[in-house]
Structure formats: structure tokens, C-alpha cells
Image (cartoon, rainbow, N blue to C red):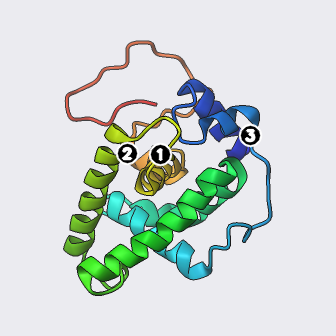
């Protein structure tokens, strides 16, 4: 099974809860890299944004799974043209806001500055989601955050470092012991 098939099945299991879920259910259409017009610098910025959302601690962060390339792939192949536009314009808005608020690029900001900036954007997207009308697009940062979570936790690194990975096929044990504070099973 390739990653695209796996993501389609995850979307089905989640009830299409991921942004663009309706496109996962109808099938992603592979397109050539670069269709969105993202540069290598944009992909690197997406890696840094993902790293601010899931930072490296005693386990690898989002940058370790090349989350920027994953975001480009999913947005290119699986999002509607409207959502693609929101994502690409959102990346430009992200860079503009970073310059205005931090007076430097996101890449040049310290880890604390990045965390504060991403937290502010998250609050903005939560408020946007509460007040948006049905026909309005989703906030761009919500897309980035959801793609970071999906990409990280569907990667080998994310599964093995954050969850109690139990390779399948294997023996089924319906009541595995669980101690408070342990990673959960997948």
C-alpha cells in the first residue's frame, strides 16, 4: 500500500474530517510537483512551521518527516483549487505577518518567538472557525496545522516515536495493559 492509499483510508476512517476530506474520499489525482508554484524556500518554510507545531524534543519533530514536502503533495493532489489558493495565499500572509510582528523572517526567529507566533495564529484560526460562514474557506493556518498532524502521525517516525507501535499482522491481544502516561496504541 502506498502513502496515498493509506491517507485515503485514514480519511474514510475519520469520516472525512480532514480538510479536503471529500477529495480524499473521491480520490487524489497525482499532479506534477511545482503545480502550486511553491519554491524550495517555501517547502523549507513549511518544514519550519511544522517544526514549530511539533518540535523536536527527546523525539523527532515534524521537520524530521519532511512535512513541507508532504503538505505540498497533499495540497497539490487532494485539495480543491479554492483550498489550494487559500493555502498558497496563506503562506504569503504567514510570511507577511511574521515580518510585521517579529521584524524578521520566521526562519531567523528564535524557538520562543516561533512558538508565540504560531500560538497567536492558532488563536486567530480558532476564532475564524467560530465565526465563519459555511461558504467561507477554512483558515490557512488550520490547514497547515492539520496537515502537520496528519503527516507526522502517519509517518513511520511519528508512529514509532509517539505511539505504542504494534506491527500488524501479529497476534491480536484485545486487552493490552495500559499504564497512565504511556503512549497509546494505534
Residue drawn at x 49%, y 32% as measured from the top left: 166
Give the numbered dot on residue 1. Answer: 3
Distance from Cα at disc 3 to Cα at disc 1:
17 Å
Label 2: state its secondary structure.
Answer: helix
Figure check: 117 above or below 19 = below
Give the quadrant of the N terminus. Answer: top right
Give the numbered dot on residue 75. Answer: none
Percent across and percent down for residue 104 are 31, 87
Label 1: state its secondary structure.
Answer: helix
Front residue of this view, candidates 26 and 80: 80
Front residue of this view, candidates 137 and 16: 137
Which residue is denoted by mark 1 in the rendering?
Answer: 153
Percent across and percent down for residue 61 are 39, 61
Front residue of this view, candidates 181 and 2: 2
Label 3: state its secondary structure.
Answer: loop
Distance from Cα at disc 2 to Cα at disc 1:
8 Å
Which mark is first along the chain, 1 or 3? Answer: 3
Figure check: 81 above or below 162 = below
From this viewpoint, is residue 74 visible? no
From this viewpoint, is residue 100 visible? yes
Residue drawn at x 47%, y 44% as measured from the top left: 159
- Asked if marks 2 and 3 touch (Cβ < 8 Å), the reply is no
- Asked if marks 2 and 1 touch (Cβ < 8 Å), the reply is yes
Q: Is residue 80 left or right of residue 138?
A: right
- Asked if marks 3 and 1 touch (Cβ < 8 Å), the reply is no
Give neighbour class at mark 1: few <14, some 14-19, many 20+ (Cα, 10 Å): some
Which mark is first along the chain, 3 or 2? Answer: 3
Answer with the quarter of the image where residue 42 lies.
bottom right
Residue drawn at x 59%, y 52% as measured from the top left: 83
Distance from Cα at disc 2 to Cα at disc 3:
22 Å
Percent across and percent down for residue 123 are 25, 52
Which residue is denoted by mark 2 in the rendering?
Answer: 162
Amino acid at each position: 500500500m502506498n502513502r496515498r492509499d493509506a491517507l485515503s483510508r485514514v480519511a474514510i476512517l475519520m469520516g472525512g474530517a480532514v480538510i479536503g476530506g471529500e477529495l480524499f474520499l473521491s480520490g487524489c489525482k497525482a499532479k506534477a510537483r511545482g503545480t502550486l508554484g511553491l519554491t524550495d524556500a517555501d517547502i523549507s518554510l513549511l518544514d519550519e512551521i511544522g517544526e514549530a507545531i511539533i518540535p523536536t524534543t527527546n523525539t523527532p519533530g515534524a521537520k524530521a518527516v519532511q512535512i513541507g514536502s508532504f503538505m505540498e503533495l497533499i495540497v497539490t493532489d487532494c485539495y480543491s483549487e479554492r483550498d489550494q489558493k487559500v493555502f498558497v495565499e496563506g503562506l504569503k500572509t504567514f510570511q507577511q505577518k511574521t515580518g510585521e510582528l517579529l521584524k524578521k523572517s520566521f526562519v531567523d526567529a528564535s524557538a520562543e518567538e516561533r512558538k508565540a507566533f504560531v500560538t497567536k495564529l492558532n488563536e486567530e484560526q480558532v476564532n475564524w472557525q467560530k465565526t465563519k460562514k459555511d461558504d467561507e474557506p477554512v483558515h490557512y493556518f488550520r490547514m497547515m496545522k492539520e496537515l502537520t498532524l496528519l503527516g507526522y502521525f502517519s509517518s513511520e517516525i511519528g508512529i514509532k516515536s509517539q505511539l505504542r507501535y504494534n506491527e500488524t499482522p501479529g497476534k491480536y491481544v484485545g486487552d493490552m495493559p495500559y499504564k497512565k502516561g504511556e503512549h497509546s496504541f494505534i
